[in-house]
Image (cartoon, rainbow, N blue to C red):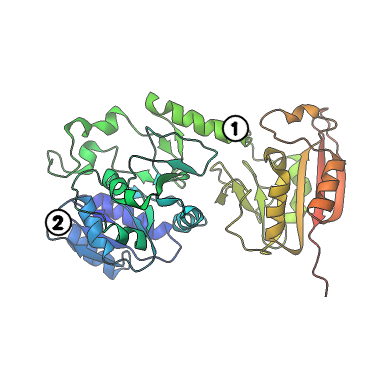
Amino acid sequence: MVTFNRLEFLKHTVKKIYERTRYPNRLWVVDNCSTDGTRDWLKKAKLHGFVHDYIFAEENKGLAAGFTLGFEKVQSEYFICTQDDIVPPDLKPCWLERMLHLFKKNEEEYVGISMRVQRIRHRDVDEHKELIESSTSLASVFRISKKTEIEAVNGFGQRPHWESTAFMQRTQPLKKKLAVATHLYADHTGFMPDNKGFAEGYTTYHTYSKERVQQGKDQPYPDIDPKTNIPLKINTHRDRHEQEAREKYWNWWGLDKRRGDKRLGEDQKLLTPYAEKGKGIEVGPGVIKCHPNAIGVDVFPYKTADILGSGSDLWMFKDGELDFVIASHCLEHFPDTKAVLREWYRVLKPGGIIAVCVPDGELRPGVIRDPHKVIFTKEVLRIIFKFDIEMLPLRYEDVPNKRKGHESILVVAQKKPNVK
């Protein structure tokens, strides 16, 4: 991390990184000749364990030069560059583990991946993809790279202005792409305050622009979820298109409309017994989980979403780690039923349970309409679970409903126990 004369931002950012990072790491802070007490605070922060260590630059040559100084201390192959006003989300798995996982998946094609902030302009955003291509620059918003590749281009250089563009230019010889993580958000706290948080009248920082000292008031960022940093409510028309895309994505997955309802649905109640013992997940719980014992996995930052994600990629769980996977009116939202069920099967222990409720497609053919992607009948589910997933059938039952047109199907199946 590089910092300069924004001590209050630095304190907040370091504290949040310390609180929200559960993956092993070493935080080095490069101070670019601050005069606001930053150096004294960093010495105390090291003593208390909030930072691993610090570097005091002899001259402020800008952000890129600061990263070049810090790069000399990098020991691991994967490392991250960030700034004093960029706050990570509070996620499980934590933001660092997620960034590492995302980068390792894509490192053959990409030289750097950063997080997304509240507003990302001039980018072609597809919410259904995990990466947003960024061909012209890549800001140091928890930007992850490989040590050997940055060594190959002789570090970050000494360009004082717009390090994000310099990073793109210096890494071009590697012939790899740059990208922003679509669903990993950082809180850019330095955008909103006057003069970007520097003292009033102070203009000698390298990114000073007269037109931008009041930018936070003229173009305020959206309101965000305090844990995930996901924008929820916009405050200027500039963000309308981006927010509409997010909401369209959430609705595609079947956003739970029962915002204030705290009562379990009748179909959810049928799944509750299967979540009472052991370790397991509920995929797509919405506003309320079937059972508090279940780990909630959802794309929207509900309070029930212990893990933010769609449930189609459970990389954070090992093979055979869970006792159960349950889902009420969720499976029909996945376009590839078999692929999703195989992933749920992978994380189950031998003897583990998958229990789902889905709309009855025979009695309710209209459910094939958006946001549903698949229509199920009891016989279709029986064939999938028995022959494609190869699980032992426990229950295949019609679930009647007092309201005509709301009938469902309950499926409970068990992963075959190990045979000795």
- Residue kind at label 1, given as amino acid type: Asn
Pinpoint residue 220: horizontal percent, then vertical percent: 33, 31
Tag 1's secondary structure?
helix
User: Which residue does the numbered mark 1 point to in the structure image?
Assistant: 251
Residue at 43% from the left image edge and 41% from the top image edge: 133
Pinpoint residue 122: horizontal percent, then vertical percent: 37, 32
Whole-angstrom CA distance, mark 2 to mark 1, is 48 Å
Residue at 18% from the left image edge and 47% from the top image edge: 160
Judged left or right of residue 190, residue 259 is right
Identify the mark nearer the N-term, 2 or 1: 2
Quarter of the figure that contains the C terminus: bottom right
For the residues labelled 2 and 1, say whether their Cβ atoms are less than 8 Å apart: no
81 up-or-down from 234: above or below: below
Please identify the quarter of the rendering in which residue 413 is found.
bottom right
Q: Is residue 255 visible?
A: no
Tag 2's secondary structure?
loop
Q: How many numbered discs? A: 2
Q: Badge 2, how many Cα within 10 Å: few under 14, some, many 20+? A: some
User: Which residue does the numbered mark 2 point to in the structure image?
Assistant: 33
Pinpoint residue 274: horizontal percent, then vertical percent: 76, 55
Query: Is 52 or 383 nearer to us in this picture?
Result: 383
Judged left or right of residue 355, residue 145 is left
